[in-house]
Every structure is written in structure tokens, then in C-alpha cells.
Image (cartoon, coloured by chain):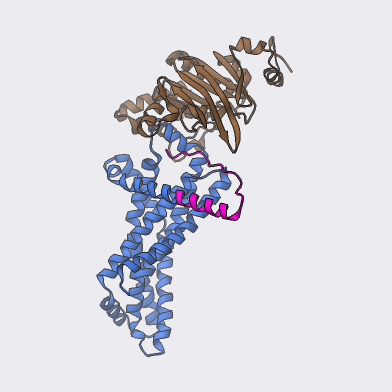
Chain colours: A brown, B blue
Amino acid sequence: MIRFEKVTKQLGGKNVLEDLSFDIEQGEIFVIVGPSGTGKSVTLKHMVRLLTPTSGAVWVGDTEVSALDGAALSKVRGRFGYLFQGGALLGWMTVAENIALPLRENTKMTEDEIAAQVEEALGLVGMAQDGDKLPSEISGGMQKRAGLARAIVRRPEIVLYDEPTSGLDPVTARTIDRLIRRLNKELGITSVVVSHDLQGALLIADRIAMLTGGRFVEVSTPKEFVASEQPDVRRFLDAQFISKKGIEGM
Amino acid sequence: MITREPVYTDEPGSMLVSLWRQIILGLGAIGRAGSLTVQALAGIPAMLLSRRGCREMMRQLFIAGIKSLPVVTVVGMFTGMILGLQVGLELRRFNQEIYIGSAVMVSLLREMGPFMSGLILAACVGSSMAAQIGTMTVNDEIAALEIMSISPVRFLMTPRMAAMVMMTPILSFYTCVLGVIGGGIVGQTQLNVPWDQYITMAIDFARMRDLYVGLFKALVFGIVITGVSCYEGFTTRMGAVGVGKATRRSVITSFLLILIFGYIITRLFYDL
């Protein structure tokens, strides 16, 4: 579904990604973990050409997205939903208007149809009563959930999640994790998640990839990941109190 | 594609290389700002046909017009009063103070009306455009629009452009009217020029051409302010500091371009 072919990305004279190659299968939840500043969000942004590789290619299906521009790029982006770290809701619109925006701008749906879709999306993220609030009137967790509702309202094939649980309390974080899993199962959405939160990653991922030094040092199922002997992976697991047997108490 | 990657370059080897690079980057910026401006102007007819576009344009008309009105009123009135006083004091040396009406009217219509309203709109509305769009850029809202296949130019810049294109000539005319009234007040109270004489001289010397050229100038200033402010907003980097820098740059660049375009238009329409 998504394929990186030897992608190198230079930013500020430094190779953030280096010969990165991987595939993401249709319908899978692929989680990218790793320390801050290793290029996780950079990887995600290449998938919708918010960034362009210095060398290499990014494919979405049969289309090389890294070579697209204009209407063709817009068409490919229509296959994606993107949850930004802060939700990226438009501040002067209510939550419902934010969610309705891609439908109003890109479809010929009637207002009644749009309202029904918005209501459904709000229900999916547990915000059925909050549609008429402004983004400034809701918490950070709710903003993320609203951002998620906006990302899925067009029923995209692929949803990209940039740090969906960062800055959230553990209960809200697990709610978001369960939501990602549920959307994947119920709507068949292919999901790519960038996260620091390994506990959440182990809960939802079909495969986890660890990005360090611009390359994946481990790509495996959650079980294999926890059992990995790779030193970077081990350090990352130890830092979050996860042993080979699972999550330890402190 | 509005969302662009920052350009990283090596440290320049010499001042000459640095200067050359600045020129190239400056030309690139002018090109991009010009291209955005043309796209925004070209999008106005389609925007006027859509309900959302018209609604957003009305909101921008309110921001650019109604909210700027108090400042424009005060500035317009005092510009006329200052003009009337300065010109009147000089004319009185030759016992010709009855001509202050014509001097105030002509200078307001040709230059001061569009110039002062342009400066006010650049400071009040342009800076707010740059700050708002800049904040949206650093908060990933512009990238979010692009991923939703919504053109940020069509969605954000076109309604602002339409509002400014309509509002700058109106506000310029309003400044001229208030300026003439202000000049008249000074004439009557401090220079002993009767009101009816002041108005008669003002109208006698005013030419429709002066009015048209002034309104045209105001229109160009509106386009320049919107183009510069939105461009600065879209190219904002580095969080809150970047928003502050973009806002500052938008005001300075708008002021400079208002002066430059003001001169060029005057030179084009008036023979030496």
C-alpha cells in the first residue's frame, strides 16, 4: 500500500532519513517508534508529500507520490486522513464545522448528508455532545479526538497519526489507542502511527518499527519486538519499564 | 503546494556570495508572492459564486472595513487638519489662504487619501492577516488544509483579497471626505476662510481624474497589502518568534511597497 524505496532526506545538511526502505500492507496498523528527533514525523510527512525525499521514492499503491504535484497530488491526498500532533483544528470554526469542512469543500453532499456524516464521526470519537464547541473550549485530548474525527470523516483508505497520545493522561491515551484499533477493524483503514508511547504501540500495532539514525533497526510484530535483542530497542523498552515478559511495575 | 520545506544553504564564503544569495532569495520571494497574488485574484469570481466564499468575504469586509473605521476616521480628519494648517500658514504670507480648499482637496485625492488609508490597513489588517495565517502555518493548520485537498489560497487568501480590493478604495474615499472636512474646520476656525468659500474652491479645483487615480492607487495598495501579508503568513517558520517576525516583515514590506507603487502610479498618470 505504501512503499519507501531507499529514501534519504537531508535537512540542514544532516541526513534525517538514510536509505530507508519499507512496505506497509493494506489494512495493517504500522507503528513507528523511536527517540525524539530521529525523523518519525519526517517519515510520515513524506507519505503525503508534505516533504520530498532528497533521493529515493515514496509510493502509494501504484503512484509515486514523491513525484506528484498539483491536481494529481491532491487526488492522492484525498486517500489519506492525517491527525496532526495538536489536532490542527481551525480556531474560528466549531468542532462540527471543522469536521464538515472536507465534505463541504470536496463533495457535492447536501447539508443533511454532511450533518449525518459529522454526527457519525463525532459519535465514533465519543464527542457526540461537543460539536458546537470551539476548539479553544475543549481540552487537548478532545482536540485530538476532534482532529481524528475530521481525518476519518471522508472515509480515507489510510490514516496517518502523528503522536496521537503525546501530552495526554494515560486514560485518554488508551482511549485514543482503542479508537485507532476500532477504526482499523470496523472501517478497514490502513493506519500509520508515529509515537513515543511504546505501551500504546504494543497494544494496537500489527507491526512496530524502531527508527534510529535515519534507519529502521527493527521491524517486527509486538511480541517479537518485546523479545528483541537489538541494543537500541532494548534501551527504548527498558526506559519504559518493558521487559521481555511484558510491562513491569516500577 | 503552499507548504514548503525550509531552504538550507551552506555558510556563504564571502560578503559578495552572501549578497548574491540574498538577491536570489529575494527574487524568489517576489515571484512566489506575485504568483499567490495572481492566484487569489483569479479565484475571486468563483468565490463570489459560492455561499461559503461570500460569507467569508463578508466577515473579511467587516474586519477590514468596519473595524478599521475608527482609526481611519481620526487619521483622515487630522490629516486634513494638518494639511489645511500647514498650507494655510504658507498661503497666508501671500494673502491667498482662500485657496486652502483646493490644496487640501487635490493633495488628499491624489496622494494623502490612498496613502494614509493604505498605511492604516497595512498596520491594522495586513499585520493581523500575517499573524493569523502565520499562526495557522506553525500549528500545521495550513498543512491540514492541503491534506484535505483544500487550497489555502482559495480558502484563506481569496476572500481577504476580495475584501481588501473592495474596501481600500472605499476607505480611501472616506479618508478624503473626512480630510476635506478637517481642512475646512481649520480654515474656518484658524484661518478665517468661510466654509462655503472653502468648499467652492475645493470642488472647483478637484478633477475627476484625481479621484480615479487616487482610487486606483488605493486598489493597488489593497492588492499589495494582501499579497505581502498572506505570503509572509504562509512562509512563517519557527513558532511564535516566527509569527512575530512575519508580522513585522509584512508591515515593513507593505509600507515600502505602498511608497514605491504610489510613486510609480503618480509618475504614470501625471506628465511632468
Percent of width and height locating residue B74 = 43, 66
Q: Is residue B129 visible?
A: no
Residue appearing at x 37%, y 81% in the figure:
B188
Specify start and end residues of the magenta stretch as a single range: B1-28
Confirm whether the magenta stretch covers residue A207. no
Percent of width and height locating residue B133 = 46, 45
Q: Nearer the viewer, residue B149 or A142?
A: B149
Percent of width and height locating residue A29 = 51, 16
Residue appearing at x 58%, y 47% in the figure:
B241
Residue B106: quarter of image: bottom left
Q: Is residue B270 visible?
A: yes
Task: Decide if residue B53 is on the left or right side of residue B225.
Answer: left
Residue appearing at x 34%, y 56% in the figure:
B167
Q: Nearer the viewer, residue B182 or B223?
A: B223
Relative to B84, does residue B156 appear above or below in the rendering? above
Task: Decide if residue A61 is on the left or right side of residue A216.
Answer: left
Q: Nearer the viewer, residue A91 or B126?
A: B126
Confirm whether the magenta stretch covers residue B4. yes
Residue appearing at x 44%, y 62% in the figure:
B119
Task: Decide if residue A164 is on the left or right side of residue B168.
Answer: right
Relative to B154, does residue A196 appear above or below in the rendering? above
Relative to A46, does residue B259 appear above or below in the rendering? below
For the C terminus of chain B, give its image quadrant: bottom left
Residue B172: quarter of image: bottom left
Relative to B209, does residue A29 appear above or below in the rendering? above
